[in-house]
Image: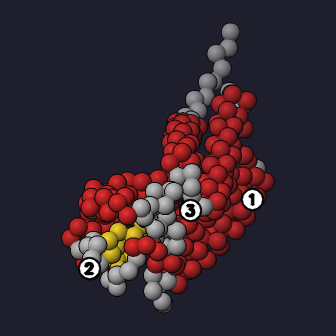
Amino acid sequence: MSTGLLTHVDLSGSMGALQIGSIIAVYIFGIVTLQAHIYYTTFPGDSWKYKTLVAAVWLLELTHTVGISYEVYRATIVLYGRPDLLTSFPVLGSMTGVGGAITLLVQTYFSLRLYKVLPKPWCHIGLACITVSTMRFFASIYLSVRAAQATSLATYRHDQAWLISALLTSGAVVDIVIAATMLQYLMKKREKGLQRMATVVDRLIAYTIRSGLLTSISAAVMLICFQAMPNNLVWLAMYSFLAKLYSNSLLSALNARQTLRDEITNSMPSVDRFTRSKGGLRRDGSVDPARFYNASQVISIEMKTTTETIQDDVKAGPSYQLDADQKI
């Protein structure tokens, strides 16, 4: 009776990491779905552009999640007991283009806010971010095709290492530029505004940091793993849920508008009494600017929502405008 030689294959750094990444991806997709549901139920009167954007992001995330889940199923079930065949992941590689599309939509949304709120020539920072993000998207399509055709992940990684590093670096840089520029703008508005508006501006600053910090840090960590650990799939596992962080940043920014409205109402309760007594509310609950916008000093804090003009003093005094349909 021959004993033979048993070869132990350690898959903890490859399939183990990829499986953990897929679990995190599915979990975050559940959060994305919940955020999308909250958006449609909370803001039924939003523009069709925002509704279409949310629907497009959710459908792309669904496709991305299905692709990742299938790749894990293929590796753990279809190819069970055949670690020698785990040399390529064509379906997961093809999802690179889907992730690039999600990143493009989200970064374009935040970049357009910069373009609309910043004065010239600083508004062109937003256009520059859109340009870089668009180039990044086309590069992700190229990588997606090459990954689907690759017969070996090691060869693909070696041949496309510079482009993968460029994509991760550019994505993190765009996130940092958007967040830093918006923070600078909000800090200037806070210094010029009255004390009672400081809470609202602080909340906007927190949302800005939250939307850009997590995605940029994740992209940077993924780049470090890609460069420092070439013999495992930890970087690929992180990629499987990186795009979902972008989706959550977009949806959380859209859903945060209701919290901001509550902050304004709590900090300026006299506004609610004034608007109800004068009948100046629209059907969607916002204040009609044509009725109350008559002061010369304005602090414009835009948040991509319906226009709300808040008058500090009915007879004389500054008014505060939240106009996010056109600006932040």
Task: Decide which of 149, 174 is in the foreground and name it.
Answer: 174
**285 above or below 21?**
below
Mark 2 lies on a secondary structure that is: loop
Q: Which residue bears the numbered disc 2?
A: 316
Q: Amino acid at mark 3?
A: Val
Residue 56 horizontal/vertical position (percent): 66, 54
Residue 106's tag is 3
Give how far apart the Cα atoms at labels 1 and 2 are.
65 Å
Where does label 1 land, which residue?
146
Pointer 2: residues within 10 angstroms few (<14), some, or many (20+)? few
Tell me where residue 181 sits by quadrant: bottom left
In this view, the residue in front, 245 or 205, is 205
Residue at 64% of width from left, 71% of height from top?
134
Q: Of discs 3 and 1, which sits in the foreground?
A: 3
Q: Position of residue 316 (x, y in %)?
A: 26, 79
Q: Position of residue 304 (x, y in %)?
A: 49, 65
